[in-house]
Image (cartoon, helix red, strand yellow):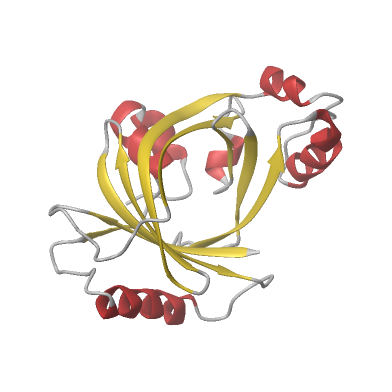
Amino acid sequence: MIEIELKFELKNKINPNLKPDFIKEVEDVYYDTKDYKLLRNGNFLRIRNAKQLDFKLSANDLTHLYCNETNYQLNDSNAEDISRVLNSIGVDVDLKRVEDLFSNLEVLAPIKKKRTSYNLEENVVMVIDEVEDLGTFLEIEYDLDAEKIDDASYYENMLVEILKKHSLYDESMRKVHIGYVELYLKKHNMEAYKLGLYQE
């Protein structure tokens, strides 16, 4: 699955005329090797709410508009699959238990946010994230059941038009070309930020 995502920093508060699907606290802890092998290649591994492991893997898209995403529950039955994904992106591990993962990796960035989510259209979700220490952001996401896409700008324009259709877009919104990890590193670990594939 390819996840296409646009992010905007919000200067003004948005009050969607929609009922949210959920409002919840989210804690994402991102991990990497000591030498930032994942960050350097545009790959990310996160643990969400201590329950789910997500890989957001580079799809050779330097715009940082889309990635390949896979998810696993944090249990030992998935250790072999998690090892296989890590090996495919250059991290040599052979996990017998999921907890062994944490002896091979270090915390890269802790991201805490209050997330309000809305379904705008089929396969199109908008979230408003109040991110601790970073600010408030709007993300609009489109999940595409595909291995690759040929024209990322088509989907970018499509998502902006959907926001406009729902009166959720204005000129004060600053498009952000990097993720929360990079925003966090830019503020707290500039040395690591400069090593990353994605920068503003």
Is 135 or 130 nearer to us in this picture? 130
Q: Residue at x 72, y 25 (%)?
A: 101
**Residue 54, can we see it?**
yes
Taking 72 as reference, is 13 left or right?
A: left
Q: Position of residue 139 (x, y in %)?
A: 36, 57
**Residue furthest out toward the top:** 103
Where is 50 relative to 140, above or below? above
Where is 75 relative to 17, above or below? above
Q: Residue at x 67, y 21 (%)?
A: 102
Q: Residue at x 14, y 69 (%)?
A: 171
Q: Position of residue 168 (x, y in %)?
A: 24, 68
In which quadrant of the rendered view does residue 98 lie? top right
Report the quarter where the N terminus lies.
Answer: bottom right
Q: Position of residue 144 (x, y in %)?
A: 59, 71
Taking 179 as reference, is 4 left or right?
A: right
**Residue furthest out toward the front:** 19
**Residue 61, can we see it?**
no
Is 51 or 7 nearer to us in this picture? 51
Taking 161 as reference, is 110 left or right?
A: right
Number of marks in the rendered image: 0
Q: Residue at x 53, y 40 (%)?
A: 39
In which quadrant of the rendered view does residue 182 lie? top left
Q: Position of residue 200 (x, y in %)?
A: 32, 52
